[in-house]
Amino acid sequence: MYDLVIQNGTVVDFEKNEKYVADVGIKDGKIIDVGKCPESAKKVIDAEGLVVSPGFIDIHMHEETLGNTVDGDHYDIANYMLRMGVTTAVGGNCGNNRQDTDVFFGFIDKNGAPVNYLLFTGHNYLRNKVGLDAYGVATKSQIQKMRDMAKREIEEEGVIGISYGIEYSPAVTFEEMVSLSSDIGYDILLSAHYRSDADKALEAINEMIDISRETKLPMQISHLGSCSAFGNMTEALELIQQAIGQGLSIQADCYPYDAFSTRIGSAVFEEGCFERWNKSYDSVMLTEEPFKGMFCDENLFYKARKEYPNMLAVAFVMNEDEVIEAYRAPFVYVASDGLLNRSQGHPRAAGTFPRVLGRFVREYKALDFIDMLKKMTILPARRLGLSNKGDIKPGMDADIAIFNADTIIDRATFEEPVNAPEGIEYVIIDGKIALEGDKVINSRLGRAIRRGELSKIL
């Protein structure tokens, strides 16, 4: 007997690039049969007219600080991830972990989570551990200490690699980053938030490519849109494609918005940023009280940077058509870069995946449905070494999103950033129903996934 059968749903064969109608039989957290399911089931879902997709895999988001509750719930970000069909997410990006890995994973081991979690260890997190701030120059001794900590994080805590947040630590040198990860002795993935954007984007992309070349490790370029959607996306994609042609493992991710978000006090907003973006103070919106929803003028901008440096701000500075151009490249995946402070921030944390499928694919007709579904599921799964996730086939983990392709759409806005999307009918994690319609059934089915469980990272 199956634990669950999903009947009459539309499944995508990623190898043939075809849709077909099938039943999906699930038992003990695994997909057992796809096609005909001859046994009875404890529960049946009628998915006629709906897409039965692998759960979305968010290769780039920013995890919560577990132990700090929001309305009695620790998972301020993952709760919204679940509602948009995400079943697995990767935190620790942009060089930053919000708390120690053992604390974060330990909490999930004990309590479960709304989604499955993997983590990077962040370079800037390690820099803070050895007493360096964003403008501190690392000594050889400090680099060695960071390297030792990174090795321990990989070996003992199970992080999947090292993330760099280069723009957030302007003093970081190329030599420091290469020394940290060269010959580290493990099969790991690197990711990087670039050194700069706009007119400096190509130089920044070359630096990330060179890190990969020197370390001989795969590099995931973070949120390519906020690096290069300023008039030079075509050249950026050509640079990456050239590196791939040279045998390097370079890939990227992107979120589907023309505005980025980060803390107002960060180095991103240093002098010269508006000239680089060809924008002014009024392109920046503050997302939290006492300035929630307010666009800056010069006085408010500097007041917020000085008095509320950890406040999340949104900068409307990118070109949407170049974001779409990025998604057409075979090496660019969908990711949210989701980050919230007490449910405030950028709507990408609650809207990314439905926005791509609803707006960019269905409404704009700018992108192919199957291609984008791959970029949300099987391709990030392969990149991460999640060999049992990302596809609807026998033997795969039963992490599934069931959605209506005709109605799926994001409803999160910059004014109301955590509004739930429409069209996500079910989310299943480990073969159990986590979400049904607009109701969360079980928000503790996710678990911590450590490096030792992964196959080779591509």
Image: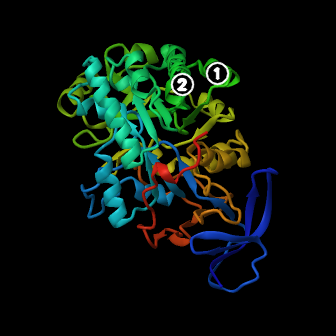
Figure quadrant of the N terminus: bottom right
Tell me, yes or no, if residue 305 can be seen here: yes
In the rendered view, tell whether residue 180 sits above or below residue 122: above
| In this picture, residue 138 sits left or right of residue 61 | left
Residue at the image point whose x is 47% and y is 20% from the top: 197
| In this picture, residue 307 sits left or right of residue 60 | left
Residue at the image point whose x is 49% and y is 28% from the top: 226
User: Which percent across, then down, holds residue 447?
Assistant: 43, 61
Residue assigned mark 2: 212
Residue 243 has which mark? 1
Figure quadrant of the C terminus: top right
In the picture, residue 306 is in which quadrant? top left
How crowded pointer 2 is (Cα within 10 Å; few <14, some 14-19, many 20+) is rated as: many
In the rendered view, tell whether residue 420 sits above or below residue 364: below
Residue at the image point whose x is 23% and y is 25% from the top: 132
Tell me, yes or no, if residue 138 can be seen here: no
